Amino acid sequence: MLAQSFSWQVTVIILPLVAALLCFMLPKWGRWLGLVMAFAITGSVIVLAYQVMNQGALRYAVGGWGAPLGIDLYVDGLSLLMLMVVALVGLVVSVYSMAYFKAGKAVHFWPLWMLLWTAMNALFLSADIFNLYVTLELLGLAAVALVALAGGVDALGAAMRYLLVSLLGSLCYLLGVALLYHSFGTVDIALLAERVESTPAVWAAMALMTVGLLFKTALFPLHFWLPPAHASAPAPVSALLSALVVKASFYILLRLWLEVFSQDSTAAAQLLGVLGAAAVLWGGVQALRQTRLKMLIAYSTVSQIGYLFLVFPLASLMAWQAGLYLLLSHALAKAAMFLAAGNILCFGGHDRIADLDRVAQRLPLSLTAFALAGVSSMGLPFSGGFIGKWMLLDAALQSGQWWWVAVIIVGGLLAAAYIFNVIGHSFTRAEISHEAKPVPAIMEWSALVLALAAVLMGLFASWPLAVMDIGAPFGGGGS
Amino acid sequence: MSSDLFYALTGASLFTLGLYALIKHAHILRKILAINVMGSGVFLLLVALAAGGQQAFDPVPHAMVITGIVVAISATALALALMLRLREASGLAVLPDTSPEELSEQLPEAPSDVASKNNGKNA
C-alpha cells in the first residue's frame, strides 16, 4: 500500500539481527554493543509507534513483491503494543544483564538475546501464517539456547525438553499451515480471512495449529515443560521467557482465532476457556506448594497464562481488550518478579522461600519490586492487572457466563496467598543465617522500574486502550 | 487411489509414526530422529497437496518445504549439540525424570554410558 523505500518495520527487525551478528563477531565489545543496540531498537520502535498512531495501520511489502508471493509486514494496534512491551522489557533486561553476567557468560548471552529480539519483532510484524512459522522456530531455537546457557544437568535437561516440545508444537502448526494453504491457496492472514469456509480441512487445521501453539504457550495440561525451563535459566533469561516468549505464541493464536477461525468455533472456545480456568487454579495451587522462589514464579506464570484463555469463550470486544491488557501487565509484572528473584538469589546464594532471612530489610528495593509486581498479579487496584481483570469480569457478566467470574476471583485469592507467603518469609529471621553478597544498585532499580510500569498501567489505562483500536484488530471478534 | 492422495496419506502416517516414537522412546537421539520423521511427513504432505488437481504446477509449497528443511536442519543440529552436552553432564542421554524401569527396558547401552562417565572421572 505504501510505496516507500525506507520502512521502520524493516528497521526494527534488521537492527537486532545486525546487533546479534556484531555481538557474536566482537565478543569483547558484546555487552556495550548490545546495550547501545537495545537503546537503538527501542528508539526505532518509538518512531514506528509515532508513525502508526498518526497514519493508522501500516502494511509494507518487502522488496515490493506484495501479498500472494512476497512477504508483507503488517503493523496495527495489537502488533504495536506487543512490539512496545518487548522493547520496554527488553531494554530494562539489557540494562540488568550488564551487571548480572560475569564477562565469560555474557559472550553467549548477548548474541542469543538479540536473535530472540529479532525473532519476536519479526513475529509480531508478520502478516502470513508461513512467515509466522519461521519466526516461531527462530524464537524457539534462540529461547532453548538461552535456557541451556545456565549449564548444569537441570538446565540442560529442561532445555532439551523445551526444545522437543517446541519442535513438536511447530510441526503441528506447520501441518495446519499445509492444510490451510491447500484449501484456500494463500498464506496471507487477511486473504485467508476473506476466503475461509467451514470445512473439515479447516477444522483439522484449527485443531492442529491450536494444539501446536498451546504447547508453546504452556496452557494446562501442556505446561509441564515450563516450570523447570523458566526456573533453571539465568534470571534475565527467565524474565524474558516468562514475560515475552510464551506471549508470542499466544499472539499468533489470538490473531488466528480473531481472523481465520472466528466462525463456528463455540465448542472449541469453551474448551479453551475450561483449560484456562484449570490452569488458573492448578498453577495457583502448585505455586503455593513450591519451596523455591523461582519455581513459585514459574507456576505463577502457568496460572496467569490461564487468564488469557478465559477471553476465548467470551469473545466480545471488551474481552479481547481485557486479554491483551492482562497480557501486557503480566509481561511487565512477571519480568519484574524474575529480576527481583535474581537479585535475591544473587544476594543470598539460594532461593529457598523458607530461608529468605530478612530480605525485606536488607534488599528493600528488590522486595518492593516483587511486592508491586505481586499487586498487579493479584489484581489489586490500581494496577495494570486490576484493570485487565475488571474488564474480564465485566465481559463475563455481560455475556451471562458468571462461572468464569468465580474462577477469576479464586485465582486472585490464590495469587495473594502465594505472594504473601514469600513476603511474609522475607521479614522473618531464618534459623541459619547466610553470608550475603552485595547486589549492584542497577539490578535492584531495573526490577523496580518494571514493577512500577506494571502498576502505572493501571493508572494510565486509556492510552493503551486507544492504541489497541488502531486498525481494529478486534473488529472481527465482536459477534 | 491417485498417486497424490497416496503420498499425502503416506505423509500423514509418517507424522503419526514419528509422534508415536517421540512419546515412546526414552533415548534423546531416538526422540530427535522421531521429530525428523514427523518433519519429513509434513514436507511430503505439503508437496503432495501442491501436485493435486489439474491446475498449473504451484511452486509456493516447494519454497515452503525448502525453508522447512533449513529450519529442521538447524533445529536438529541444536538438539544434537544439547544432547551431547547433557550426556557429558549427566552421563545419560535421557530426559532428567525418566524412571529406572523405562531406562532398563529401552536403553541396553545404559551401563556402558555410566561406565564411560566413570572412566572419564578416573582419568
Image: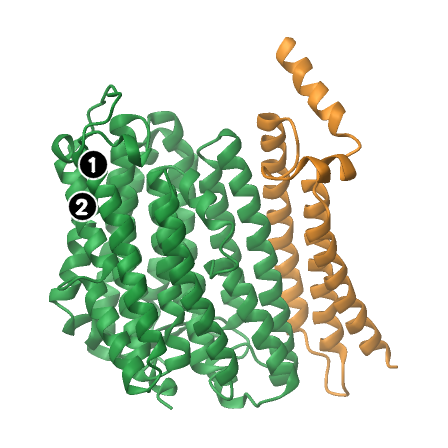
Chain colours: A green, B orange
Along the horizontal axis of the image, is A376 left or right of B11? left
Local crowd size for mark 1, using a 10 Å CA cut-off: few (<14), some (14–19), many (≥20): many
Q: Chain of mark 1?
A: A
Residue placed under numbered mark 1 in the picture:
A426
Residue at the image position 73 percent from the left and 76 percent from the top: B49
Q: Quadrant of the N terminus of chain A?
A: bottom left
Q: Does A34 appear above or below A70?
A: above
* Sequence order check, earlier mark of 2 and 1: 2
Is the residue at mark 2 from the same chain as the one at mark 1? yes
Q: Is residue A419 above or below residue A358?
A: below
Q: Secondary structure at mark 2?
A: helix
Task: Using the image as rendered, state which of residue A27 and residue A443 is in the foreground.
Answer: A443
User: Foreground residue, A187 or B63?
Assistant: A187
Return the residue nearer the eye: A80 or A283.
A283
Can you give x and y, in whole percent of width and height, for residue A113 in the image? 39, 45
A66 w.r.t. B94: above or below: below
Q: Amino acid at mark 1?
A: Ser
Q: Residue furthest right?
A: B1
- Residue A427: % across, % down: 16, 35
Q: Which mark is residue A369?
A: 2
Quadrant in the rendering for residue B66: bottom right
User: How many angstroms separate mark 2 from mark 1 (CA)?
Assistant: 13 Å
